[in-house]
Image (cartoon, coloured by chain):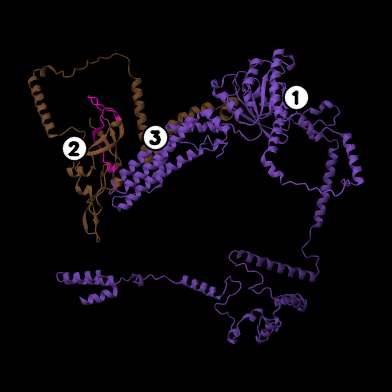
Chain colours: A brown, B purple
Amino acid sequence: MPQGDYIDLHRKRNGYRHDHFERKRKKEAREVHKRSQIAQKTLGIKGKMLTKKRYAEKALMKKTLAMHEESSSRRKVDDDVQEGAVPAYLLDRDATTRAKVLSNTVKQKRKEKAGKWEVPLPKVRPVAEDEMFRVIRSGKRKTKQWKRMITKATFVGPSFTRKPPKYERFIRPSGLRFTKAHVTHPELKCTFNLEIIGVKKNPNGPMYTSLGVITKGTVIEVNVSELGLVTPAGKVVWGKYAQVTNNPENDGCINAVLLV
Amino acid sequence: MVQYNFKKITVVPTGKDFIDIILSRTQRQTPTVVHKGYAISRIRQFYMRKVKYTQQNYHDKLSTIIEEFPRLDDIHPFYGDLLHVLYNKDHYKLALGQINTARNLIGKIAKDYVKLLKYGDSLYRCKSLKVAALGRMCTVIKRVGPSLAYLEQIRQHMARLPSIDPNTRTILICGYPNVGKSSFINKITRADVDVQPYAFTTKSLFVGHTDYKYLRYQVIDTPGILDRPFEDRNIIEMCSITALAHLRAAVLFFLDISGSCGYSIAQQAALFHSIKSLFMNKPLIIVCNKTDLQALEGISEDDKKLVMEMKAEAMKTLIGQGGEPTNDERVLLTMSTLTEEGVIAVKNAACERLLDQRVELKMKSKKLNDCLNRFHVAMPKPRDQKERPPCIPEAVLEAKAKKAEQAAEKQKKLEKDLEDENGGAGVYSASLRKHYILANDEWKEDIMPEILDGHNVYDFVDPDILQRLEELEREEGMRQEQEADDDFEMDGAELTPEEQEALAEIRKKKRLLIQQHRMKKSTAESRPTVPRKFDKDKKYTSERMGRQLSTLGLDPTLAINRARSKSRGRKRERSVDRGDQNGTDDMDVDGNQPNKKLRLRSRSQSRSRSKSRPPYEVVPGEGLKDSAQKKKAVKLAEKSHKKRNKDARKGEADRIDASSIQIGFILHKLYTESCELSYPLLEVALKALKGLYGYRGESYCGLI
C-alpha cells in the first residue's frame, strides 16, 4: 500500500475501533430519518429541487419493486389484433371506405395545387406590427417617425449591405442577426447546427419574408451538406427546408425541425 | 510553478455539484426582486447582471482548477515522468484542455446573451434570455463532467504521493523483488514500510529520512524491478525506472547472495547489466544482503565471477569521480538486515560517497567561484629572504605540550563516539546507568521498585532520614523568627511627638499625591499631553518652589536664584525693561520678580489690567499653529452649534426661474379656460399658482 494511505495503513496495523461496525450500522439506519427531516425543513428553491430529486428516486424505486414482483406465473394473453380488423357487425361497410379514399385523393390534389404543405406547426400566433417594429424618431427635432427597427430575429444574407442610413426605413440591428440554426431531424431525433441559406416564408406576411424576419413558424432553408443526404438519382442534397419551432428573440437561438 | 507538495490543490467538484454551487450563488448574491413596471433599462440591467455574475464565477472556478494542477512540462522532470507513468500525460492534458475550452465557451455565451439582452423590451423577454444563457452555460459544464471526475481522482491520488525533493541528497535503493530493500530502509529510517515474504510488496516509492554528519538524507525505496525489455514493464516498475533516471542520487544495488528471494545471482547480475546505463554519474554501491544465510566468501565460483564483474562496473563510476581506485571497500559491501550487522556501514558509505560527489560538483560549478572571489587572505609581501614564523610565547608552548600529554593519557572514549559508531542519534540510545557504583555490577540494569510491602521505598533510602528531618525543621523555625524581627512597626508607639507630627505630615502629603495621581490618570485619555516647558497650570514656577520650601522651614532664596540663573537665556535686556513696566501681580510672592506670562502680553494698559486673554491669542498648550488657524477653529466650532431651520419655508434654493415660458403658457391657458370655469375653481387654481411660483406668481396673478 502506498506510503500516503494513512487511514488504510492504520486500519491494517491496528484494526478497527471496538464499536466501529455497530456505530456504522446505526448511522446508516439513522440516515433515513435524517433525510426525511431535511426534506421537511428545506425551504425555497432548494426545497423544490430536493423534492423533485426525491420524487424521481421514489418513481425509480417503485418501478424496480414492480419489476421484482412480476410473477412468473402464466396468465391468459390476448392475441394481438390485426391492423384493419373490424368486428363482425361492421363488416359490410366496404363501399363507404372506398369513397373515402377517393375523396381523400381529391383533397390532396387540391392541396398540392394550392401549395399548402404539411408542416409541423400549421398554425402560429399572429405577430402584430407594433410588436414587430419599434418606432425610431429621427430628424433634428426628433419629430420624424418613419423609421422602424425590427425587434425580432432576422436573417440577412452574406452579401447584404445596408441602404444609406438616411434612406433606410427598416433597421435590422446586427445584434439580432442570426446565421445558424439548430435543426432537428424528426426521424433520427438528433440536432445539428446548420447554416441558414435564406428565409422561405414567414406566416405573418410577405413583407416579413422579404425583410428576412424569423419568428416562430417561419420556414427557412438550411445547408444540409454535412448530413450527407443523397437523392435517389444520386445527387447530393445540400439545401432543405426547416420550420422554426421556438421564439428566437426570447431564447437567443433558432431551433428548427427539418421538413423531410 | 514548482510544487512538490500536491496537497494544496483545491477539490474539483463534480459536474452536477458545480452547477448547483454556481447557480445557488447567483441566486443568493444578486438582487432578486424585479417587477414589470420598472423602467426597461433597469430590468435589462438586472438580468444582465445575473448573466455576467454567473459567467464570472464559472470563469474563476475553472481558472483555479487549470492553474492549480501542475503543468507536466514546467515541473521537475522526475515528477513530470512520474505523473506520466501514473496517469498518462495525454489523458491529463486532454482533460485540462477540455476545462479550458469550457471556460472559453462560457465566456462567449455570456457575451452573446448580454448583447441580446440590450434588445429586450419586456420583462418576459429579458427573463427568457437570461434563462437561456444560464441554461447553456450549465449544459457546457454538464458535458465536461467526466473530465471533472477524472481530475478529481487524479488530485486525490497526487495528494498522497510521497513528497520527494529531487534536488536534495538522496539515496536510491534498487534491486530485484524480495532482496531486502524495504527492511533496510526500515532499519535506517523511521519509515514503516511493509515487509512481506511475497514479491512486489512495495508497489510505489517510499521515502524515509536519515542523518549523517549533521545533514539530512532522503532514502527512497523503490519497488522491485524484473529483468524485462523496457517496453514490457508495468507501471510499478516504471516508477522505479523513473526514479533511477531522473534523481541525482547515490544508488544502492541490492544483491541477494543467498537466493532466498527466488532469483539466482545470475539473474540479478543480468538485471544489473541491463540497467547499468541508468547508473551513469551516480555513486554506485553494490550491497550483498542476507549474509546471515550465506556468506559472500561461500558462494560458487561462477557467482563470484559475476559479482566481481559488477564490482568492476561500480569501480568505474568511482574512478570516474576521481576517487582512489584502490579503496574497494566503498564499492562492494555485505550486510544482513536480520542480524543488523553492516547496516550502518552501508549507510555511512553511501552517504559519504554522495557527499563527496556533491561537494566536488559544487566546487566545480560557477556559483562557488562567485563566493570564492570574495575571500582573500592577505599575505604581506616578503621583502627579504628572512624567515618570520609566528611568535608564540614559551609559556603557551609549554602549556600546549602539557595538555597534549594529558589528552593522550586520558583518551577516553566519548559517548558521542560511541553513538556515532552504533548508528547515529536516532538509532543508538546511551545507557545512562553504566557508571553506577553498586555492590554487585549485575544490579546496574535492574528496575528499581517504588513501593515494596506497602511502604514507599524512598522513605527508607537514607538511614539518617529522621535526623535530617529534625534539622530541617529547626532551620525553618529560625528563619521564620528572623522574618518576624524584620517587620517594621508603624504604630507610632515609640515615636517622639515631633516624629509623630512629621509622620502625620508625610502621610497627608502622600495621600494628596495619590489623589492627584488618580485624577490625572482618569483624565489621561482626554487630556492633551503638553510638554513640561509650556506649563499651563503654572506648577513649575520658582515662586511655588519658594513657597513650598518656606513652609518646610527652609530659606528658599538661594535655591530660587540658582534655578533662575540656569533658566534665563541670552535675551535678558528686554525682559528686564518690561518687567519694570508691568507692576503688581498678586501671584508674585516676592514682589519684584516679573511674571513670565505678563512679559509676553501686549503693552496696552487696558489689556494688562484685564486678566482675560485676547480672543485669538494662541496659548502654547492648545496645539494650534497661529492665530489665523485658531480663528478658523473657533468659527468651525460655532458653526456646528447653530440650530437647523425646521420651518419648511421656501428658501433661496427653491426659487424657479421666472423667465421660462412654461409659466406664461400655464397662466395663459388658465386665463382662457377660466372663462368657462366657475369662479371658486379659479380662485383655487390661482392660490395653487401663488404657492408654486412665489412672488412672481403673484404678479402674474395680478394680471389676471
Q: Please, what is the three-letter code of the amino acid marked with disc 2?
A: Lys
Label 3 crowd bin: few (<14), some (14–19), many (20+), radius 10 Å: some
Residue nearer the viewer, B439 or A106: A106
Q: Nearer the viewer, residue B674 or B492?
A: B674
Q: Is residue A59 above or below residue B651?
A: above
Query: Could you say whether the residue bearing mark 3 is in a helix, strand or loop?
Result: helix
Residue at the spot x=70%, y=33% of the render? B355
Q: What separation in Å lies between label 1 and label 3 (alpha carbons)?
A: 64 Å
Q: Residue at x 61, y 73 (%)?
A: B620
Marks 2, 1: nearer the viewer: 1
Position of residue B47 relative to residue B240, above or below, is below
Check if mark 2's residue and mark 3's residue have beta carbons within 8 Å: no
Left or right: B565 with respect to B123? right
Give the label, 1 or 3, closer to the camera: 1
In the image, residue B607 sits, relative to residue A2, either above or below, namely: below
User: Marks 2/1: CA distance?
Assistant: 99 Å
Which range of residues does the magenta coloring cover?
Answer: A227-250
Mark 1 vs mark 3: which is more N-terminal? 3
Residue marked by disc 3:
B142
**Residue B672 figure quarter:** bottom left
Q: Which residue is mark 1?
A: B329
Residue B200 in sight: yes
Q: Position of residue B502 (x, y in %)?
A: 77, 70
Q: Which residue bears the numbered disc 2?
A: A123
- Judging from the image, mark 1 belongs to the subunit labelled B
Q: Residue at x 39, y 34 (%)?
A: B142
